[in-house]
């Protein structure tokens, strides 16, 4: 499955030294991957897919936390 391969490649990608626009693009890509995997998960109920979605969500939250910055 190409989708799972893309998700694994995204998960292993380094996120250091990214510009703000790179972070926004990465966040959108993560959202897209998660939603696509979720559609497959609904049909198969494969626990490996759920684990992959959780890991991607965690990475997406880290990116978004960096985008929004810390509250003052």
Image: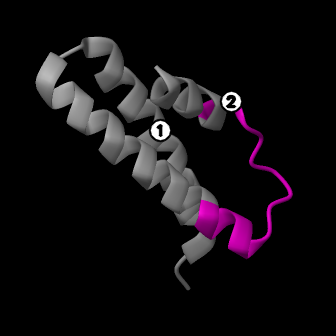
Give the CA separation, mark 2 to mark 1: 10 Å
Q: Is residue 69 visible?
A: no
Q: Residue drawn 37% across and 43% down?
A: 34
The colour scheme used here is: one colour
Determine crowd level at label 2: few under 14, some 14-19, many 20+ residues with C-alpha closer than 10 A. few
Nearest the viewer among 61 and 12 is: 12
**Residue found at the far bottom of this picture:** 72
Q: Is residue 44 above or below residue 17?
A: above
Q: Is residue 41 visible?
A: yes
- Residue 56: % across, % down: 47, 38
Q: Which mark is residue 56?
A: 1
- Residue 37: % across, % down: 33, 34
- Residue 49: % across, % down: 33, 21
Upstream in sequence: badge 2 or badge 1: 2
Q: Which mark is residue 1?
A: none
In the image, residue 33 lies in the stretch drawn in magenta: no
Quadrant in the picture for residue 14: top right
Task: State left or right for residue 17 relative to residue 13.
Answer: right
Nearest the viewer among 4 and 31 is: 4
Question: Does dot 2 land on a helix, a strand or a loop?
Answer: helix
Determine crowd level at label 1: few under 14, some 14-19, many 20+ residues with C-alpha closer than 10 A. many
Q: Is residue 48 above or below residue 41?
A: above
Region of the chain picked out in magenta, as a range: 11-25
Q: Residue drawn 51% across and 26% down?
A: 2
Q: Is residue 12 above or below residue 44?
A: below
In the image, residue 22 lies in the stretch drawn in magenta: yes
Nearest the viewer among 11 and 67 is: 11
Marks 2 and 1 close (CB-CB < 8 Å): no
Residue linked to disc 2 = 12
């Amino acid at each position: 499955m190409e989708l799972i391969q893309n998700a694994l490649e995204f998960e292993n990608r380094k996120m250091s030294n990214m510009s703000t626009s790179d972070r926004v693009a990465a966040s959108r890509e993560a959202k897209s991957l998660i939603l696509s995997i979720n559609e497959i998960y609904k049909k198969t109920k494969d626990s490996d897919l759920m684990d992959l979605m959780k890991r991607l969500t965690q990475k997406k939250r880290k990116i978004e936390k960096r985008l929004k910055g810390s509250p003052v």
